[in-house]
Image: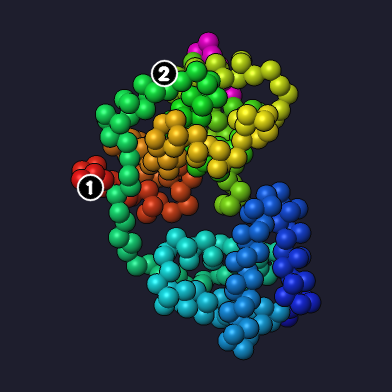
Amino acid sequence: MDKKCAGTTKDILDSFAVYLSHKGRSENTIKTYCGVIESYANWLDGNQKAIQNLTKQDIQSYIDYLESENRSVSTINKIFNTINTFVKSIDLPEMTDNVNRSQKKIDYVAPEVLREEELHALLKRAKADSSKRNVAIVYTLLYTGVRVSELCMLNKEDIQLNYKSQTGQIKVRNETQGNERIIPLTKELVHKLHEYLTSRQDDCDALFLSNYQKRIAARTVQHMLKEEYGVYPHKLRHTFCFDLVQKGVDLSIVAQLSGHSDVNVTKQYMLDINDTVN
């Protein structure tokens, strides 16, 4: 290759961070991406190679190494995608062309979802909850399947509601994957979001606020759900995906709505619900 990465590893990581910042990535995403590349640079150094002289074979060797360490396919894909972003940042996108990754079958475990009686109990608690915000959060997680990190990033402008026709949609941004997706809203969710938003007396852009009128944090949402509802956010997400699959929605559509980059992940919801409970 004619082009090389200039400077020390720290210089390269700093330049990558600036590139990601210009792309609008969050601080947490930048930290995660740079951490992946730093680990890769350390591996290269330990194998008498250098990220300053990166080659396609170096990338292939690292992927092969990760597979030999029995890292999960999803983890390897995330690392590969980060390296792919990195080589784009140094204007060498062709470096990841035709890099081979394992096509081995993944033995997925059926995800833990809410059983019918658990769902009824959850909705009963929501009906008795005086906090319109908490109720809106529960319904949003349950009826859109968004990740808690995505929920916390939502702004009011990401929600389109037509209360008269009881229709709406939500635009979800995924900073890790660098994309967006649109999810239609159920009548129940439209109603809960309308109730919550009309109760707001502030000008904050964030859709969901903490008790201190700041954008709500993932940890706050997790704590609220555990203490008030006895459930974790991922279980609500799994229930959303599982329900769509059970209703016969095409897997590609479920993958799109849920933000799965690999439809094989979505296939886990085809497992029998009896496999999810004892």
Q: Name the disc covering residue 127, or none.
A: 2
Q: Name the disc covering residue 12, or none.
A: none
Spatial separation of the CA atoms under disc 1 and disc 2: 30 Å
Residues at marks 1 and 2 touching, judged by CB atoms closer than 8 Å: no
Residue 74 in picture, x, y percent from top left? 44, 60
Vertical placement of 265 versus 153: above or below? below
Viewer-closest of 19 and 120: 120
Q: Amino acid at mark 2?
A: Lys
> From which residue to which does the magenta span run?
160-165
Q: Which residue is mark 1?
A: 275
Q: Amino acid at mark 1?
A: Asp
Residue 128 in picture, x, y percent from top left? 42, 18
Q: Quadrant of the C terminus?
A: top left
Vertical placement of 209 versus 110: above or below? above
- Left or right: 103 with respect to 116? right
What residue do we see at 61% from left, 35% from top?
Answer: 216
Snapshot quadrant of residue 9:
bottom right
